[in-house]
Image (spheres, rainbow, N blue to C red):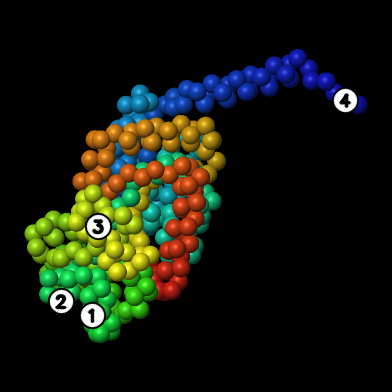
Amino acid sequence: MIIQPTLATATFAWLALFVSSVHAQIYPAKPLRIIVGQTAGGISDLIARMVAQRFTESFKQTVVVENRAGAAGGIATEMAVKAAPDGYTLLLSSAGPIVINPGLYPRLGYDPQRDLSPIAFIASSPLVLVVHPSVPAKTVTELIALAKSQPDRLSYSSGGNGSPPHLTAELFKSMTGTRMTHVPFKGSAPSVIALVGGQVDLSFSTVAVTLPQVRAGRIRALAVTSQQRTVSVPQLPTMAEAGLPGFESQQWFALFGPAALSKDIITRLNAEVARWLETPDVRARLATEGAETGKLSLDQFAAFIRTDAARWLKVIRASGATAE
């Protein structure tokens, strides 16, 4: 027997669809928060506040940045994973918590690729290979030759075990067949200060941290780790141009939401980010931090995350790197 829907049932279904449609159209209807896994002042925090300002202007809603540092970004990421998928809690994350931490922490309790929705790729920033002036290598090829001639003689600093600079150096060692000694510090700034002081021979670090020291002549820059030269230091060759084809390592920054976030909200937020990333003032502000905007569709962004995670997992396993 076929049961015909009653008028009340049909009306209820129509109302449910109508309410859902209206909800999507009026989003956001209340204040939003952006969680960032870094203390105030870092580049992730800077970008989060840029996003918050732009969303506030566009949506006419208050957007609050909430700093939840700790566990290498894991605390902030877990908060975003567990948030209601209604578009009112977002995550501004760097690459580490998304593509590196899963390889370093076997018991994260969540999978960033499974439990988060990529919303928008915002910017990327290369690292710079820098050496102390006492190191007799003026190019990347000379540095490789020096390291090969003196195994374990050269030392390199990083912002900590399992940090992007550490893993970038491990990638360098793997691709060149060299052996060097790792000296970890608690953060990028102490790492570069140690290099300036001659406690270590070389380092991979951010443009923002290294450039003032390079300009002052305290350390020497050899190359950037991006695929293309960066607008911040256009005179520096890429690692590939400097003699190491295929080498690439970049910090990137992006916006995420909980896994079940609706496609309509993701599309709305993605379009808004894409619009203001084209503005000269945003590009100029990011450039002061050594970062550049990037264009990736949602599908391209998801594929990029998968590829980047697989690449760093390979480096982590080969090097035996562990988190602190």
Task: Find the residue positioned furthest to the right.
Answer: 1
Query: What residue sits 75% from the left and 14% below the top?
Result: 7
Relative to 323, 285 lies left or right: left
Q: Can you identify the residue that label 3 sits on? A: 206
Circle 3: is it few (<14), some (14-19), or many (20+) Cα within 10 Å? many
Indicate which label's residue lies in the foreground, 2 or 3. 2
Q: CA distance from mark 3 to mark 1?
A: 24 Å
Numbered badge on residue 136: 2
Q: CA distance from mark 3 to mark 4?
A: 68 Å
Whole-percent x, y for residue 131 in the image: 18, 69
Vertical relation: 216 (above or below) 48 = below
Relative to 175, 9 lies left or right: right
- Residue type at mark 4 is Ile
Q: CA distance from mark 2 to mark 3?
A: 22 Å
Q: Secondary structure at mark 3?
A: strand
Whole-percent x, y for residue 36 in the image: 35, 46
Indicate which label's residue lies in the foreground, 3 or 4. 3
Q: CA distance from mark 1 to mark 2?
A: 8 Å
Task: Find the residue positioned furthest to the left.
Answer: 216
Q: CA distance from mark 1 to mark 4?
A: 83 Å
Could you tell which of marks 3 and 4 lies nearer the N-terminus? 4
- Residue type at mark 1 is Leu
Q: Secondary structure at mark 2?
A: loop
